[in-house]
Every structure is written in structure tokens, then in C-alpha cells.
Amino acid sequence: MAAPASAAASPPPHHGLPDEIFIWEILVRLPPKALLRCRAVCRAWRSATSARDFLLSHHGRQPTLPLLHCYNFVGDEVDSLDIIPFDHRAGVVATDQLQSIARLGHAFFRPLASCDGLVVLTKNYARFSICNPATRQYSPLPLLSDFIFLGMYQHGPTGEYRLLLGPEAQDGCFVYTLGSDLPPRHVDIDCPDVEEEELIYPSGSVLFHGSLHLCIGNMIIAFNTTAESFRQMRAPVDPWGADLFEMEGMLGMSIYNDASTSIDIWRTQDYESEVWALKYRVELPVAEFGNFSKHLWVVVVSSDGDVLVLVKVDDRLLQIDVDGKMVASFHCRGLGPTRHRLKQTLVSHTLFPPLEGYLVNSLPFL
């Protein structure tokens, strides 16, 4: 009896297509979970799809999607957290729009930031950690327990991923390099109108045009991620309580009106000159759901420029368009929006192994 052919000698599972085309035109476009399953098909696919040049190309083809989180309850207690990219692209069926890519247990986590597939998490805003949901890498960040998180960025000259931190027991701002065992280092604010205590209450940050932008008090502060220096930026209106985001290749800002019945969406016409224009006024469905002042909302922008308004109302998450019309309603007790967007990656980040407590494919991932 002839010996069975080895896996390496097995014919390719696709019929008629050269491996080069199948790998670089089809596999490279798959979502990370589907690609990982395909690695089990044959050794040739596993080798090709594990190479760094393939992983970088694969990451480049992944969509950048609004990041949602969903708390799973056992009774009235939070049992775990799902990390969910909201795939609202045209042609995606409703059942595939909210697919969890990772579940974390044993802690009340909350996403704070996302950059190049990495997600910074917090527990009660006092303990921080970082993970890659696609590769299931995770590490706590114990050096940050005395700081306020302001933002995350990649430092262009070094390629390092860094966190911008505000004061709590400390004075001024600080920068922490992920993967380093050194404590956060001090950075001068250099903005005379910024009160250091205001940095304790930022409304979130967005990375745009090489700078982290934050609404601090009644002003916008831009932190240049290359020079690691601050500057003050003109806002179109008092930005107290506003959210910042990227919109149509420009910096956008959204803010409630005084009655909390509508959201004004501003966009820079000329970023360098700090010229803004009112782009949309979104009327909220107050008649149906009442006043929105106590509800969480966030504005996100898809890759094709569409503006989404996501509103958490009781056990529902509403998707509203710029005309104030409800596009979709998702009924789930723990589902909520974040201010962040996620672009998944299977690229192995070197920052993880040096971190104390680094784990892969283990708790808190379930």
C-alpha cells in the first residue's frame, strides 16, 4: 500500500489559482480570525501568512472601524468584556456588524485608546493595561497607577509606542514608552493658559496630523508627537464637553447644544490656519427618547467619510445619520460606544515581551 502524501506535498486546496495570487490577493484581505483558521490548511499557507511583509500588507488592508465594547452580565454582575469593531460598511449583513474579536474576563475593563491594533484598557481608571485583541497579547502597566491617561501615539523618529499622561499626584505631563522599564518622564506643557488641574478631566484625544488633540477646559491643546511639545489651538466654539475626531481628512469636533436636543459637528476648513466651519447640525430623536443629556454619545467617521452618531439609550445603541434619522438600533444591555477606532493587526509588536506580567493567549483573554 502506498504511503499517504505528506501535508507539504498535498495539492493546494484552491483549484487552478497559483499560490502567489491566492495568498497575496485573497488571504491578505481576510479578517484576522479567518486568516488564522486558514493557516491550518497547509504548511505553505502557514509559512507565507506568518512572514512580516505579509502581515504588514494584511494590516494595511484591514478596515478602520468604530470600536464598541460590550459588558456581559451574570445576574447584575459584570462577568466579561467583548471588544467589538462596528462593521457598518455597505453590504455587511446585520448579523455580521457586531462580531466580537476578543473577550476579557476577571476584571471590569474599559477601552481607553487604540493605535495600530493595540488597545489600552483601564480598570476603574486607576489600573492600566495594554493588549492586541487579534494576537491575544496582554500586559498590565503597573508604572502608570499614579497618572491620568491622556492619549496614545507612535513616535515617528523611533517607532516606539508611547502614552501621554496627565498629573494626579504629579505636576505637569509625562510620557511613557511602552516596553520600557523606566518610569514616565516629565514633559513641559508650555501653554500658559492651561491649568494643570484641568488635565485631570480631558474629554478624550484624537491623533491627527502628527499631533494628539485634546479638549482641555475651554480650549483645544495639540501635542506634537514628534517634538513632544504642546501648543494651544483655536476652537470654533467653547469646546467644554466636546469630542474630537478625524473627519474627511480634517479635524472634526462635535458638541451638544445647550438644550441637548442636537449635536453640532464642526470641521476645520484649513487646519494650519485653524479655520473651522459648521458642517452638520444633527437633530436628536428627543420626541421618542427624551432628553439626551444623560446618555453617552460619540461621533465617528467611516473610511468613506460617512458620519455616524452613536447614542446609548438604556439597553439600546442607536445609530443616527446626519439628518437625525435612526439608521439602526441594537438591543443589548452592555453594548456601548467608545471614542476610538480599531484597525486590527497580526503584526507582532516587540513592546510586549519586556513588559512585566506579559501573557499571550491566556487570562484575562477567555
Image (tube, grey):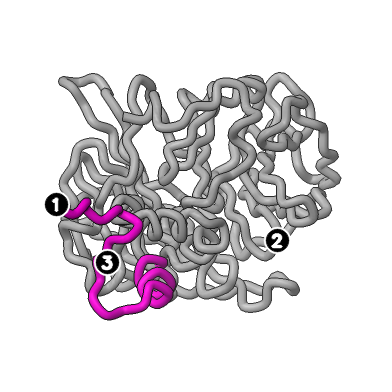
Q: What element carries label 2?
A: loop
Give the mark, 3 or 2, whose residue is nearer the N terminus: 3
Tell me which amino acid carries mark 3.
Pro
Residue 14 relative to residue 142: left or right? left
Nearer the observer: mark 3 or 2; the answer is 3
Give the mark, 3 or 1, whose residue is nearer the N terminus: 1
Query: Which residue is found at the position 75% from the left and 29% from the top?
Result: 184
Disc 3: which residue? 11
**Residue 120 image point, x, y percent:** 52, 38
Visible residue check, residue 154? yes
Q: Which mark is residue 1?
A: 1
- Measure the alpha-carbon separation of dots 1 and 2: 66 Å
Q: Nearer the viewer, residue 110 or 270?
A: 110
Residue 345 relative to residue 53: left or right? left
Mark 1 crowd level (few <14, some 14–19, many ≥20, 10 Å Cα):
few
**Residue 257 image point, x, y percent:** 43, 57
Tell me which amino acid carries mark 1.
Met
Q: Is mark 1 on a helix, strand or loop?
A: loop
Outermost residue toward the front in this view: 1
- Measure the alpha-carbon separation of dots 3 and 2: 48 Å
Q: In this view, does 33 lie above or below 16?
A: above
Tell me which amino acid carries mark 2.
Gly
Give the mark, 1 or 2, whose residue is nearer the N terminus: 1
Residues shaded magenta: 1-28
- Measure the alpha-carbon separation of dots 3 and 1: 20 Å
Residues tagged 3 and 2 counted as in contact (Cβ below 8 A): no
Check if residue 4 falls in the magenta segment.
yes
